Image (tube, rainbow, N blue to C red):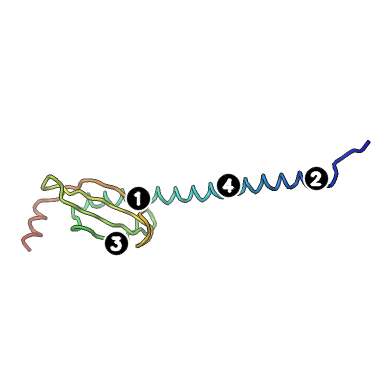
Amino acid sequence: MKRGFTLLEVLVALAIVALGLSAAFAATGQAARTAEQLRVRTLAQWAAADALTALRLAGELPRGQARREEEISGRTWWVEYRVRQSAAETLRDVEVRVGPERDAPVLASARGVVRVRVEAEEAEYEE
């Protein structure tokens, strides 16, 4: 009576284990990439919210559409502002869009209403 495994059985078992391990490593790599993408999108969402809050606190809004690089949350972002008149005279509808680079796709956006000072608006029109 023979005891043990043949060489062919050992090779088949090793091939099965190798396939299983390669699938596990591929899944781990994909999970790491997904986690990084989610981290960047979360930071972009925070950056958009921070930029909108900064506009609210400053009380000064760009006219129409403006783009600029800004350091937010320890990272440089390309931020685009779109300001439109709302139904109320002292309110502006503001959309902030954030991306990692100038021509890169937008990763996050925030939208809100910002109150403007009427005196500041009148002074701008008088100039």
Residue hosting label 1? 108
Gap in angstroms between the C-alphas marked 3 and 1: 15 Å
Q: Quadrant of the N terminus?
A: top right
Residue hosting label 3? 68
Residue 38 place in picture, x, y as percent: 44, 47
Callout 1 amino acid: Ala
Residue 19 place in picture, x, y as percent: 68, 47
Q: Residue at x 12, y 51 (%)?
A: 117
CB within 8 Å, label 4 to label 2:
no
Determine which quarter of the picture holds residue 66.
bottom left
Mark 2 burial class by Cα count in 10 Å: few <14, some 14-19, many 20+: few
Gap in angstroms between the C-alphas marked 4 and 2: 27 Å
Which numbered disc, 3 or 2, marks the residue closer to the eye?
Answer: 2
Mark 4 burial class by Cα count in 10 Å: few <14, some 14-19, many 20+: few
Mark 3 burial class by Cα count in 10 Å: few <14, some 14-19, many 20+: few
Image disc number at residue 10: 2
Q: Which of marks 3 and 2 is nearer the N terminus?
A: 2
Image disc number at residue 23: none
Gap in angstroms between the C-alphas marked 3 and 2: 62 Å
Mark 1 burial class by Cα count in 10 Å: few <14, some 14-19, many 20+: many
Q: Is residue 3 above or below residue 75?
A: above
Residue 70 place in picture, x, y as percent: 32, 59
Image disc number at residue 28: 4
Q: What element carries label 1?
A: strand
Residue 87 place in picture, x, y as percent: 13, 45
Q: In this view, does 24 lie above or below 74?
A: above
List the single residue furthest toward the left: 126
Which numbered disc, 4 or 2, marks the residue closer to the eye?
Answer: 2
Q: Residue at x 8, y 53 (%)?
A: 119
Q: Earlier in the sequence, mark 2 or mark 1?
A: 2
